[in-house]
Image (cartoon, rainbow, N blue to C red):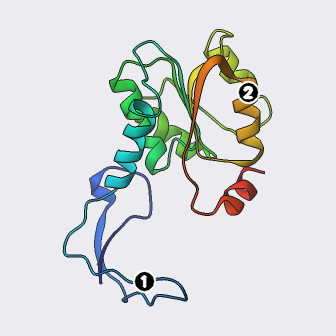
Amino acid sequence: MKAVSYDRFGGPEVLEYVELPDPTPGTRQLLIETAAVGVNFPDIACAHLLLQASTTLRAGESLLVHGAAGGVGSLAVQIGKALGAGPVIGTASTAQRREFVKALGADAAISYDEPGWTEQVRELTSGRGVDVLIESIGGEVSSKTSTRWLLSAGICCSVPLADPASRSRRAD
């Protein structure tokens, strides 16, 4: 089968068109033949729906995006900035991912797995907390932000997790 693959962050120049072995479906799985597909359209739709259907992010409102270097998260950062949100804060696990988040336009990129990250959120919002939280990490990270840093009238939008157990372990 043909696939688009990448092994590092970047723009379209990091994408490679490759030939891979045809996948073999396992128990309770199926294989779908496609003639054409878009790259990350579900991520675009999900990010848009989170910011404009689950809530209506407005210019000047603060946005915290967990997992901001991922598919939905990176698009949520860009959509948030395009809508005039600010500050737009992204979280990511590594320095390289945080650099990527900043390059997308986030006002700040912080590590969710280091002590004091919640205090950084408070500082970046001038002590107010965030108006909108996009939650895609799960586990302890989710419980800390949804209970401590979301404004009392704020909105928390959760991204459905394919495997919640593995996501919770990653956040620990």
For residue 49, the mark is: none
Q: Look at 51% across and 38% down and name the residue there.
A: 99
Classify 146 as above or below 129: below
Classify 23 as above or below 42: below
Number of residues whose C-alpha sits closer than 10 Å to that of mark 1, classed few (under 14), some (14–19) or many (20 or more): few
Q: Nearer the viewer, residue 115 or 159?
A: 159
For residue 30, the mark is: 1
Find residue 148 and report its horizontal and vertical position in percent: 76, 25
Q: In this rendering, would 90 be left or right of 144?
A: left
The amino acid on which the numbered mark 2 sits, given as a three-letter code, is Thr
Find residue 12 and report its horizontal and vertical position in percent: 27, 54
Find residue 168 and report its horizontal and vertical position in percent: 72, 54
| SS type, badge 1 | loop
Q: In this rendering, would 143 be left or right of 95?
A: right
Can I make out residue 57 in this image? yes
Q: In this rendering, would 120 be left or right of 71?
A: right
Q: Look at 59% across and 42% down and name the residue there.
A: 92
For residue 118, the mark is: 2
Q: In this rendering, would 22 be left or right of 73?
A: left
Q: Mark 1 touching mark 2, by CB under 8 A?
A: no
Find residue 113 and report its horizontal and vertical position in percent: 73, 42
Q: Look at 67% across and 57% down and name the residue there.
A: 167
Classify 38 as above or below 125: below
**For residue 37, which quarter of the picture?**
bottom left
The amino acid on which the numbered mark 1 sits, given as a three-letter code, is Leu
Question: Nearer the observer, disc 1 or disc 2?
Answer: 1
